[in-house]
Image (cartoon, rainbow, N blue to C red):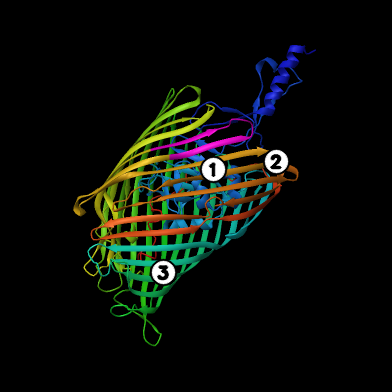
Amino acid sequence: MITHSRLLFLGVITLATATVSYSMSGTGSAPNLSVGDKSDSVPTQTVVPDSLADYDLLDEVTVTGKKPLIQTEATKVIYNMEEDPTAATATTLDALRKVPMLSVDADGNVKMKGEGNFRIFLNGKPDPSLSANYKEVLRGMPASTIKKIEVITEPGAKYDAEGTGGIINIITNNATRLYGYTATLRANASTRDVGGGVSAMTKVGNVSASVNYGHNYNYGYKVDLTNTSIYLDNPRDHYYILKANSTMKSNIDFGDLQLSWEPDTLNLFTLSGNLFNLRNSMPLNMNYYMLDDKGQQRWHYNGLQDRTQKYMGLSLNSSYQHNFSKPEHNIVASYQYSYGINDSDNTSTFKDFENYDGEPMANHRNDMHYPSHEHTLQLDYTLPLGEKHVIETGAKYIVRRNYGDTQYLVQDASGTWVEDPDASINMKQFQDVGAVYGVYTGKYGKLTAKGGLRYEYTHMGADFKTPGYDNYSQDLNNLVPNAHLSYNLDHGSSVTASYQMRINRPAVSQLNPYRDNTTPLVVSYGNPDLTSQRSNSVTLTYSNFMLPVGMNISAGYSHISDMIVNYSFLDQDNVINQTYGNIGSKDGFNMYAYLSWRPIRGLSLSVNGGANYDHYMADKMNVDNDGWGWNVSGNIDYELPYDMQISLYGGGGRSGIMLQGTGSGWHYDGLAFSKKFLKEKRLEVVLSASGFVTPSSKYINTSTLPGVIVENQVSVKTWSIGMSVSYRLGSLSSQVKKTSKSIMNDDVQSGGGSSQPGGRGNR
C-alpha cells in the first residue's frame, strides 16, 4: 500500500511534468528550467527517482520542452526559425533582423556585430548566388523555408581562412521525424509576394531521403532612389541630381535533396544537392538634372534603365565516413562540385534633352555573362585522446574556373546595337587554393581549451582574351592561428575568450580592370594589383540562460591592416571614379548583447542589439574617419489559449561610418498571429503585417571626397499584409544522417562577387 506522503510526492512529480520545460545552453551547463512551455517538438527526458524505482505504479515521468528560439554554443549562436511564428510570411532578409548579433539596414545590407565582411552558407556550403548578390537572393527567399540560422562568430582553423566577420549558415527546412514518411505543404501570399513549396522525408531500411522545394514570386518591391553630387569647386555645374523609381519583380526557385545509406554502424555514405535560381527585373524610370550654385536648372534629360538579372547556383556533394571502434574517432572523405551563373542585361536609353551641353548621351547596353565552376576535395580526421582531448586535422584543395564575357554595345542612328570593342572584355579567372589544418580541443575540469593552425596557399589570376589587357597572377601564402578558452561558471553560465586571425583575399570583381560606366558621370573598375588583407581580433563573451533573464554578451576589438578599401575620387572631367586599393587600416571596438525573459507563462520577451566604434585611416589619401554605429531590436511572443500565438517585433539603428562617409538611421516593425488546427496540430494559419507603424523606410549614405560630396538616398515601401497556410502529412521519427564533416568553402566573400570575373556588374 502507498502511504499518503508517497501519494503527495507522486502528485508533485506529476504536476512538474505538466509545467517544467528545459533547454540546453550548448556550453556544457545544466538544463535551463523554466515554467510554462509546452510542446512536443523535442524528445522527452525520462526521470526515474531512485526512491521510487521499486514501485510498479510509477514506471517513468517525462519532462517535455519546447525547443528554445535561441541556443548558444562556444563559437556560435543558433536561431531556430521554426519557433518564430512571424517567419511564416516574412522574407529571409526580414527574419535576419531578429537574429542575435546581426543587423539589416533599410537598404538590405547585413552586418555581423557591425562588420560587413562575412560569409553566407546555404546548408553548410557556400552558394554562388548568395556570394554574387545576397540582398536580392535573401529578399526573395521566404523565411518559412528556413529551419535555423547559425551565426558562427569565431571560425576555427578547420574553416577556410577567408573572412573577418564570421559565417552565417542558413539551414533549410526539412521534415524532422522518422520511420515512415512525412511531408509539409505550404503556401503564402501578401501584398508583396506569393509562393509555396513542399518539404518531405522518408526512411526505407537503412536508406533515408529528404527533399525541399519552393517557389516564390515577388511583385511589389517598390524603391525610390535619389543620387546627389555637389561639386564644391564648380559654381556653374554645382548640383548633379539623379532621381529614379522602380518596382522590382522576381521569381525564385530553391530546393535541396539529401540521401544517406548506412550499411552498418561503421560506415556512412551521403549524397546531397542544392539548387537556387533567381530571376528579377528592375525597370528604372530616371531623371537627370544639373543645377548651378544658385539652384537654377542648367540642363535636364530623362532616361529608362531596363535591368534583368539571373543568379543560379547548383552544387552536388558526396561524402564517405568511416567510424572506428572508439566513439567520435572517424575519417571523412568528401567531394563537391558547384556551378554558378550570374548574368545581367542592362539597357539604358535617354531622351528629352533640355539645354544639355555637348553631345547627348548615347543609348547603350551592357550584356554580362559569368559562369563559374568549382571542384573541391577534402579529407578530415578526428582522433579522441581519452574522454577529454580531441585532435582534428585535415586537408583541402579547391579548383575554381570562372569565365566572364562582358559586351558593351551602343545604339547607332539606325537603331542597331553595335559592340564597342574598346569597352568590352572577355576573360578567364582561375583560383587554386590548397590548405592543411590542425585543431586541438581539451577539457580540464570546467575549462575547455581549443587552439588551431591553418596554412593556405593560393594561386590566382586571370587570362584575357580581349586585346589590350595584361594577364596577371598572384601567389599568396597565409598562416592563420586561432585560440579559444571557455570556462563554465556556476548556475549554467560560461565565460569565453578567443583570438583569431583571418584573411580577406581580393575578389575577382575587385581585381578586374573592366570599366563600368553604366551610370553617367560615374565609372567603376577593379585593381589587379590588390593583395590580401589580414585581421586580428580578440573577443570576450559571457552566456547564461539559467537566470530569469537569459543573456549572451560579447565585447571585442579588431585590427585590419592593408585593408582592401572601396574608395572614390573626382577626375578632371568631373567624373567620379570608384575603385579598390590596399590603402587603409581599421581599428574596431564592439559590444553586443542578446537578452531574453519569460515573466509569466506563455510570454517571451527578447532584446538584441549593440554598438560598434570604427576608426579608418588611409595615409595615402590623407583620410582619417571615425564614428559610432548601433542597432537594437525587440520581440514579444505570447502564447494564447486554443493553440494561438501573437508576436510583435520592431527595431532600428544607425549604420556605422566608412572610409569616406557615413550612413543614416533605419527602423522596422511588424506583427503576426498564428493558429493551429486539427489533430496533432497538422494545420497552421498565420496572419501578418509589417511596416504598419513606419510604412516606408529611408536610408541615406553620404560620402565626402576631395572636391565633391555624394549622397545616395534609398526609400523602400515596407508596408505589407499577408497570410501563410501549412499542412503536415504522415509521420516520421529521425533526420537524414550526415557525415560528421562536410565541405564548406567559406572563402567566397558575400556580396563581393568573386564568381563574377567579367566585370563589376550593376549596382
Residue flagged by tag 3: what amino acid is it?
His
Residue flagged by tag 2: what amino acid is it?
Asp
Find the magenta span and give its range.
591-609
Q: Which residue matches tag 1?
A: 267
Task: Bin the neighbour count of mark 2 within 10 Å (Cα to Cα): few under 14, some 14-19, many 20 and up.
Answer: few
Q: Closer to us: mark 2 or mark 1?
A: 2
Q: Which of the pair 631/525 is nearer the observer?
A: 631
Q: Earlier in the sequence, mark 3 or mark 1?
A: 1
Q: Which residue matches tag 2?
A: 643
Can you give x and y, in whole percent of width and height, for residue 55 in the image?
Answer: 74, 17
Q: Closer to us: mark 2 or mark 3?
A: 2
Q: Closer to us: mark 3 or mark 1?
A: 3
Q: Is residue 313 left or right of residue 194?
A: left
Residue flagged by tag 1: what amino acid is it?
Asn
Q: Using the image, determine if residue 718 lies above or below residue 414.
A: above
Q: For the residues marked 3 and 1, what is the alpha-carbon distance in whole angstroms? A: 42 Å
Res 329 seen here: yes
User: SS for tag 3?
Assistant: strand
Q: For the residues marked 2 and 3, what is the alpha-carbon distance in whole angstroms? A: 51 Å
Q: Earlier in the sequence, mark 2 or mark 3?
A: 3
Q: Which residue matches tag 3?
A: 369
Can you give x and y, in whole percent of width and height, for residue 573 in the image?
Answer: 23, 70
Can you give x and y, in whole percent of width and height, for residue 553 in the image?
Answer: 43, 33
